[in-house]
């Protein structure tokens, strides 16, 4: 079994940079790194910050143990001096950033990491791995939640993602407003409600469909969901109601033309007196397929592949850049036009009605206060210690819900468009 | 820190199916599940099996400990009887399948899991998570290796993938023929050579570029790679050679028009006498961008986002289906045309020259032997125990290399096309 220790979830070059900086005396220069994106995935109108709390929890364990240091020394990645430094390593700097569930746009300073060069540069890869993945999933999931118009979504994509990525994806989907996950590890690790009943294999295992349904109802009660599309859906529904009665909680349809099948199933269920029995549909649903089912008698959606792969945008494109050294702004030449050096402070500006109008980002200063401004950055880590009031997943979920209410309505359109509000960097 | 124990990397419904099957007496029916895909990602000409050995290693640890069982019982996912059964659970069945590094096509029986229903159904999610992810990355990486035409590739995408997915991605890319990874955890866990030198942050940290280069050369020697595009590339190359001398191993260019920059950089390096200094390019390279650089004086490619996200196909679309119960083939009605029940045996048929022509798949039997047939399935687990001769990563890497030599040349084209060879299911 692999170790889930985080310190080696790091790129080789971070260690060689630390080696060189320790040797030339620059390792202790006070630095500020910022996480931001230059662009959203094509056509996306907003990004969703996700993963920050998960990152902070991983940082608690970001130490190099003896075996890890020995590996780095024995493979020649680091010299003796750096090996000793790594043995004592713990992050002692500060991390602040946008709340989980906050929206972001190109050039939003999503996370700010400050401390010595050496202690901060080591966190580049882990920080980006967590934020790029979780934010990508949360953004796709948020669009599905919008498309579902209040109907419940179940995340069931674990089988389409690397096994640990699946757990993080379930968390991000829940943050974005999904109601359940199929993933038990996510249920245990993050307290997310889990759901699931039976696969086609369960029906095929039995001598016939009625036998399978009877078994499931006997074991799980009528408050269960019967999968009715293994053979013939209409017969499946008749079998389901014959066995469970009209008190059956739900039927699930996992294949075929879901629009037509939902209508036919609703009519059939109603004609059998099962007017309260819900219809759950699944099968390669993305935000567009969900939106297309808005007028159909569907009660719940199961989403898998599309949500755990970010629905066409599997990574968020966030970067981790050095913006300040010893109080002096720095910037890579080729980015002079797009990027501004210096530690940034960000607020979101709103109309008196509460609708967001723009984001103001000020390098090395603070924006002139205006009514209806909302500061976007909060503290996550101070002097190496995570703050006591890290947001809970439930709080982050509610935060995103409020943020999505506050953006101009165009921002919620699924069609391709520009970022919903501009980020104005006052340089 | 999270636990990396695998048993809960499982979908809720697998546990409820086990509960119901234990109660109705079907849990012990002898079953065969198969992993296959109905289609390759759009336009792809082959798939690459990856992750199987990784899966088998995870299965060694696939047990439910007390706390996991308590979680499942306390949240009502399973009843007392199932909780007791889970406490004693270990897989005692057989697993066979295609070698890692083997090619696959629609309907290839990539993996076969047999045992009781209950013990096999529990492995669905973990099996698919591992194989879908790793195979997706390996297929994308293999196309990049083809495009690179013998030049070395470095995987440096950790920051664009969930932190643990990144380690698995590095393994899959190495299996596919990449030469190095930036990911230290992959280096330690799988023995993959790691590489990396410096980021733009290292140059920006210093008072000027010559100071940064001098520091890096002092610490790492001349056998290092200097990143020359922080400010002006031509000046960067002059600084690099002035400081390291013409014995400098390599320069890296990470932005701009890589085609033009590679040419100019080569000319400049040669004019400075650094004729042996290599040029490494990186920056959003996918298989097409790599192919487009074939005629340029590039020595190595660094690939990140595209490889770890499967270059447009982040998951492989493999499914895990029950195909046989107590020796009887089973199949879901809606799949009657596309899917055939029963345990399959597969061989690849070749011309006398060694070129593959087709794959023959026989349900509940074995193909009539022909010269130049190659059996495609090997044993991974027998009676719950992994076999002693699990393939090493190096062996799997070589296996894929040989497989790619054996397919018709059209199969290596990057353009969209049909599967290179047909899979003929003899039903």
Image (spheres, coloured by chain):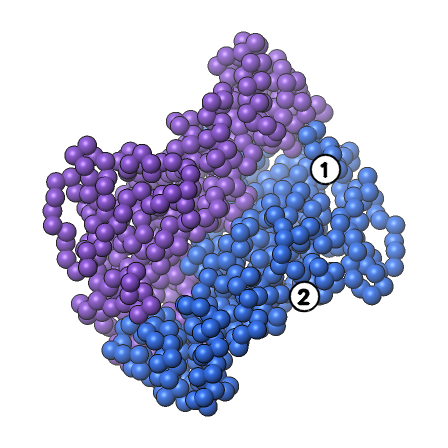
Chain colours: A purple, B blue
Q: Residue at x 48, y 14 (%)?
A: A276
Answer left or right for B287 relative to A318.
Answer: right
Quadrant position of the C terminus of chain B in the picture: top right
Residue B269 x/y as whole percent = 45, 84
Q: Give the alpha-carbon distance from disc 1 to disc 2, as whole Å.
A: 30 Å
Q: Residue at x 17, y 60 (%)?
A: A364
Chain under callout 2: B
Label 1 close to label 2 by CB (< 8 Å)? no
Vertical placement of residue A181 versus A214, above or below: below
The foreground one among B96 and B298 is: B298
Looking at marks 1 and 2 on the same chain, the residue that comes earlier in the sequence is marked by: 1
Residue B115 x/y as whole percent = 69, 41
Q: Which residue is mark 2?
A: B401
Residue A363 appears in view: yes
Q: Which residue is mark 1?
A: B339
Vertical placement of residue B88 versus B410, above or below: above
Answer left or right for B372 relative to A289.
Answer: right
The foreground one among A408 and B158 is: A408
Q: Which mark is residue A10?
A: none
Q: Residue at x 33, y 45 (%)?
A: A419
Q: Secondary structure at mark 1?
A: loop
Residue B335 x/y as whole percent = 69, 33
Q: Residue at x 42, y 59 (%)?
A: B159
């Amino acid at each position: 079994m692999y170790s889930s220790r985080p310190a080696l979830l790091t790129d080789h070059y971070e260690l060689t940079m630390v080696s060189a900086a320790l040797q030339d005396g620059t390792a202790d220069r006070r630095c500020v790194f910022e996480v931001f994106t230059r662009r959203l995935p094509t056509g996306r109108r907003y990004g969703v910050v996700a993963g920050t709390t998960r990152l902070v929890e991983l940082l608690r364990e970001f130490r190099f143990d003896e075996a890890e240091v020995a590996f780095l020394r024995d493979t020649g990645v680091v010299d003796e001096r750096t090996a000793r430094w790594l043995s004592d390593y713990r992050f002692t700097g500060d991390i602040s950033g946008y709340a989980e569930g906050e929206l972001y746009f190109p050039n939003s300073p999503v996370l700010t990491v400050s401390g010595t060069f050496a202690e901060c540069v080591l966190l580049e890869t882990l920080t980006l791995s967590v934020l790029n993945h979780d934010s990508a999933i949360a953004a796709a999931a948020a669009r599905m939640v919008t498309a579902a118009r209040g109907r419940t979504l179940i995340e069931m994509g674990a089988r389409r993602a690397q096994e640990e990525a699946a757990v993080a994806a379930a968390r991000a989907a829940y943050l974005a407003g999904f109601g359940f996950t199929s993933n038990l590890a996510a249920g245990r690790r993050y307290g997310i409600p889990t759901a699931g009943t039976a696969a086609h294999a369960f029906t095929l295992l039995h001598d016939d469909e009625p036998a399978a349904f009877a078994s499931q109802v006997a074991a799980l009660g009528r408050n269960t969901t019967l999968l009715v599309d293994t053979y013939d859906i209409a017969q499946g529904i008749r079998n389901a109601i014959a066995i469970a009665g009209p008190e059956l909680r739900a039927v699930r349809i996992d294949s075929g033309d879901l629009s037509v099948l939902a209508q036919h199933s609703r009519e059939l269920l109603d004609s059998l007196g099962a007017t309260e029995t819900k219809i759950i549909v699944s099968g390669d649903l993305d935000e567009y397929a969900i939106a297309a089912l808005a007028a159909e008698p569907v009660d719940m959606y199961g989403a898998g592949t599309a949500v755990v792969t970010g629905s066409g945008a599997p990574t968020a494109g966030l970067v981790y850049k050095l913006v300040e050294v010893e109080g002096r702004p720095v910037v890579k030449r080729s980015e002079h036009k797009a990027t501004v050096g210096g530690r940034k402070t960000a607020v979101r500006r709103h109309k008196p009605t509460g609708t967001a109008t723009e984001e103001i980002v000020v390098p090395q200063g603070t924006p002139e206060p205006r009514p209806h401004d909302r500061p976007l950055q909060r503290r996550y880590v101070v002097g190496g210690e995570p703050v006591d009031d890290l947001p809970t997943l439930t709080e982050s979920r509610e935060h995103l819900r409020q943020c999505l209410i506050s953006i101009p309505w165009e921002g919620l359109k699924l069609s391709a468009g520009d970022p919903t509000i501009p980020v104005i960097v006052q340089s």
